[in-house]
Amino acid sequence: MLLLALSVVCGTLSGSLYPDLFPFSHLRFILVILLYPILVITLRRQTIVVIGLSLLSIFLIGYFLASYKMISNRTISFSVDSEPVFVCNGIVMGEPRRKIWGSTVDIDLRGCKNKWEKKYAVSYGGVRVSTRQKDLSLIDGDHVRFMAKYRDPPDIDNFSYKRYLLVHGIAATGWVYGKVYIEETSSSYFRKYFHDLRRRISYSMPQDIPEERTAIIESLAIGKRDGITSAMRGYFSASGLSHILAISGLHVGLIALMIYLVSKMIFGFSSRLLLSIPLQIVASIIMLPIVWGYVFLTQCSMSSIRAAIMISIFMMGVIIKRRQNLINTLSIAVIIILITMPLSVLDVSFQLSVTAVLGILLLGYPIVQRLNLHFDGRSMSKRVGRNIVSVTAITFSATVFTLPLVAYHFHMVTMLGLISNLIAVPLVSILLVPSIFIASIISLFSAALSYPMWIVSSSLTGLFIGFAKMISTSGGIFVFQYVPSIYEVILIYIGLVLAIFWKRVLLNRGRG
């Protein structure tokens, strides 16, 4: 399964970076799918050849899917930078993001025309437009009309902003002249429902909470990050804690774990239920819809969807009572994610999520198993020792495995990142995220009853912000510029894997 996942990764990566090398066509795609079983049947006795054909076929399927998606995302029905101002209509994708000077919103174009034309010409392509409207009240699926001038997305410093937008389905950026007008509101009850939930949670937060704390709380509660200032982002980036600001696998995993444990505790009191259905299955069945509800509440970011897919695959194994190999579970999740969202291979959050989980599985769990031998027992001190060891080992292994990618993408290495994560991750995991989640749930029923929990969340957020500022300001000498090439990153990961398995290789040789 791991080899299949690597084949998909290599295929989608090749198709994303070089989509025109072997362009997608439906005929080629069908030929790959049809020829594979024919060749397997013909060469069924030659196992190595069949395995090679299987990996090649998976590689080609990944390549075709990624190249098709990349070409589709970068295609827009008119030439940007050379055309005049257009009057366009389209469908809103996601929700607007507030800025100091106004708002930005992503729109899937449906029709455009010059100012002097009467009829709209059929248009296509995703655009990210900016407007000075700060009170832009739009939801996903709204049909809008606006007048804008477009251009190719510029790269920012060493960051390929154009590629980042292409991964998210955006081919061009634009500036709106005038206002964005709603022609038809979204007809999706599902979208309206979660939009209303986000508004109720946001409006329930006390007004006396400082703005910087409110911005962090909204980011973790409903996935709304536009209130976080650039200065605040700088503090968290310099302290190695920027990953905590965005809804990611960490947050989805924490919510899943909390719901799972609470469900086991509540339904554990029912002896009749325990005799009919295993408690793990009941907790898993309850947890999955709540986790996906949290994903939709936090605006379905790609990172949260991927985390929910990974958790769902693991929990489905629990429900069907199948013993799981965690590496195979991760491989299946990667295959499903890249087949359904092939351009995720270029997304930084996907790369960091997969490498973090891989680091935990390859390095973190073995360390936990070895060190927990010294804390064997049921006493309180032993339990506390095991928990501290587990959190430390998991944080250490995830940080070590993501460090090369962080240096490659962000051109910066924070040596205090490990120490800051060892302190901040437990704070966020055990206190901050649960308190925000509980406050959000209570606020859906009563804003007044949620007030104490919002105050608790605010206090914890203040500690979190203060810690990030302290680390970023006092640890400046531990932050240095390092820009490894892609080949250096690959060599580093090969070295990490060899360093982990070298004892196993020596032991196997000794036994032989």
Image: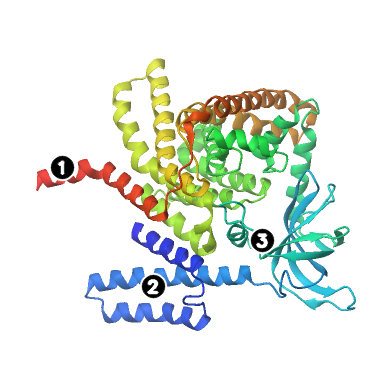
Q: Earlier in the sequence, mark 2 or mark 3?
A: 2
Residue drawn at point x = 62 percent, y = 69 percent: 74
Between 352 and 364, which is closer to the camera in this rendering? 352
Which label belongs to residue 507?
A: 1
Amino acid type at image mark 1: Leu
Q: Position of residue 134 (x, y in %)?
A: 83, 47
Between 332 and 259, which is closer to the camera in this rendering? 332
Between 323 and 480, which is closer to the camera in this rendering? 480
Q: Position of residue 45 (x, y in %)?
A: 22, 75
The image shows residue 411, relative to residue 191, as above or below, that is: above
Q: Position of residue 283 (x, y in %)?
A: 52, 40
Q: Position of residue 286 (x, y in %)?
A: 57, 43
The quadrant holding residue 128 is: bottom right
The quadrant holding residue 208 is: top right
Which label belongs to residue 57?
A: 2
Q: Earlier in the sequence, mark 1 or mark 3?
A: 3
Q: CA distance from mark 1 to mark 3?
A: 54 Å
| Residue 269 in view, yes or no | no
Residue at label 3? 153
